[in-house]
Image: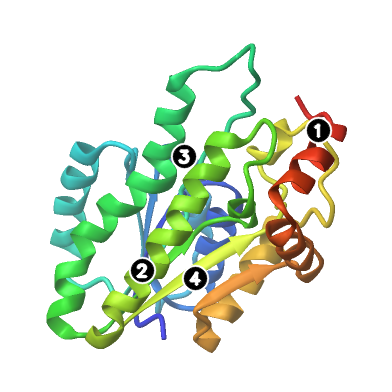
Amino acid sequence: MLGKTVLITGASRGIGFSLTKKLVDSGYNVVAIARKTRRLEDLFTSNVNSNSKLKAYQCDVSSKEEVENTWLKISEEFPQIDSVILNAGVGFLVTPKTYSAEFAEKTFGVNLMGVIYLIEKVLPQMLERKSGLIAGVSSLADARGFSGSGFYCASKAALSTYLEGLRVELHHYGIKVVTIKPGFVKTDMTAQNKFEMPFLMEPDKAAEIIMKGLKKGKRVIQFPLPTVLAVKLVKFIPDALYEFLAKRTKIV
């Protein structure tokens, strides 16, 4: 399903780092993209799987120019990318007192445009050979505009919708598109949350679930189940009721 060579973004921390480790341990060639690649150095020294190859590239995926320059370097060493896991993501707790369009630009730049920029690069070769896998990491937060996370929720809702359309468009070309929707995962990003996060999961566990889902050929990978069910309920309750309940739980 994943082929031999996998490109992953946001590879230096959280789910991305755990996925990178699992891919390397499983013998895949891994093209790891991150803004900070220092943490990936340990994987280079500890990698004893002779069947795999790991190469890290420093890149801010929200910059189209950086993506283009990085892709040129990648193409020289890896002429064929079989799968991409577009995992890079950012989020900010934004209150009315800290409101700034800059937070929106950064959030949408990484969470949405960063995905689009990479797909633009990898898609032509996948279309040519009529095979490949594109997996985008969205979030269960795409269901509603949760207080304090409006930019993040909106960016993930846009990403989920975009991937859904792309999945239909690329079906006839033999290209698989997967939407990944985690719940709360213990990362630097969730560490800033000031509210209780039910069923908070370790990155390694999240990566394990994602890998299993990809190998099984799932179109949507969402977890954990209690959060999935809760979000489905929240998504379909009337707007007025949701807003009434949300106002009673002050987060910001």
- Residue at position x 84%, y 52% in the image: 198
Q: Nearer the viewer, residue 41 or 153?
A: 153
Q: Which residue position holds label 1?
A: 247
Q: Which residue position holds label 3?
A: 38
Q: Quadrant of the N terminus?
A: bottom left
Residue 116, given in percent of the width and then of the height, sits at 30, 53
Q: SS at mark 1?
A: helix
Pointer 4 or 1: first along the chain: 4
- Using the image, determine if residue 96 lies above or below residue 185: above
Return the mark for residue 131: none
Q: Nearer the viewer, residue 97 or 183?
A: 97
Residue 174 seen by the camera: no
Pointer 4 or 3: first along the chain: 4
Q: CA distance from mark 1 to mark 3?
A: 42 Å
Q: Which residue position holds label 4?
A: 23
Residue 56, given in percent of the width and then of the height, sits at 36, 51
Q: SS at mark 4?
A: helix
